[in-house]
Image (cartoon, helix red, strand yellow):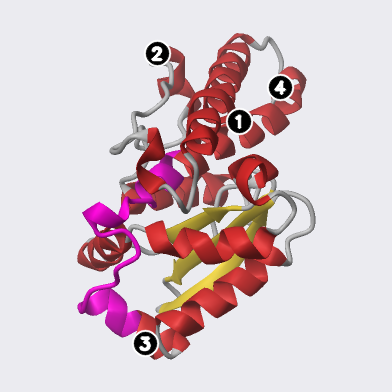
Amino acid sequence: MSMLSTARTAARTARASRALPFASFSLAARAKSLHTLPELDYAYDALEPHISGQIMKLHHTKHHQTYVTGLNAAEESYAKAPSPKERILLQPALKFNGGGHINHSLFWKNLAPQSQGGGQLAAGPFKDAVDADFGGVDGLKKKLNAATAAIQGSGWGWLGYNPTTKKLEVVTTANQDPLLSHIPIIGIDIWEHSYYLQYQNVKADYLQAIWSVINFKEAERRYVELHRNKVTI
């Protein structure tokens, strides 16, 4: 995939998810408007006992903030870089911090307290697609958890929509790489900072617990909107 195709894909993915605090990964635009840490739609302790308030606060205010700070710094340096070589050298920082910002901005929307419907998949077109592509929500959980648990090191497990096959598919990405091959519907952070204080080294327990606070309403909204907009890659 060419760099131009990758940029176009990233922009389409962002428009489809509507979970991001910016419309595209445009360096020129970012030089004029710095990224900021998005606010959560719920209190830090609202996802307990499944995800502790301590983890949520650290994850949001420390880890995500670090990606925001790093992205702003990298983009400022990129805008001032005097040569193509220096801009190329900045690309890893842009990818890592930009991906961290994109992924986490989606992740917060991806979660909801049980009092607000977290963990509840209602009847509708998204549920129909899950039933068709995975044999039901239990099949989805099993496949996504297995793929995510198998990630070596840090990364993300995704439920994404493939516009080519027109199916929901399980995909993983390494480190903070954003999902570009599919339209993200649900993302699960498997970096240790997302679970270690509570679940220590037992990733399987974290992956089981997080489904109790997955925001299926948001997943439904993403799924319906991408079809309404006829998003393609």
Camera-near label (3 vs 2) is: 3
Q: If the image is split into quadrants, where does the C terminus sit?
A: bottom left
Identify the residue position indicated by label 2 in the image: 32
- Whole-percent x, y for residue 169 in the image: 51, 75
Give whichever of discs 3 and 2 has the lower sequence position: 2
The answer to whether 165 is drawn above or below residue 186 in the figure is: below
Identified by mark 2, the residue type is Lys
What span is colored magenta in the figure?
Answer: 105-129
From mark 2 to mark 4, how far is it between C-alphas? 21 Å
Tag 3 and tag 2, C-beta contact below 8 Å: no
Residue 231 seen: yes
Identify the residue position indicated by label 1 in the image: 97
Camera-near label (1 vs 3) is: 3
Q: Secondary structure at mark 1?
A: helix
Identify the residue position indicated by label 3 in the image: 131
Q: If the image is split into quadrants, where does the N terminus sit?
A: bottom right
From mark 1 to mark 4, how far is it between C-alphas? 20 Å
Identify the residue position indicated by label 4 in the image: 84
Identified by mark 4, the residue type is Pro
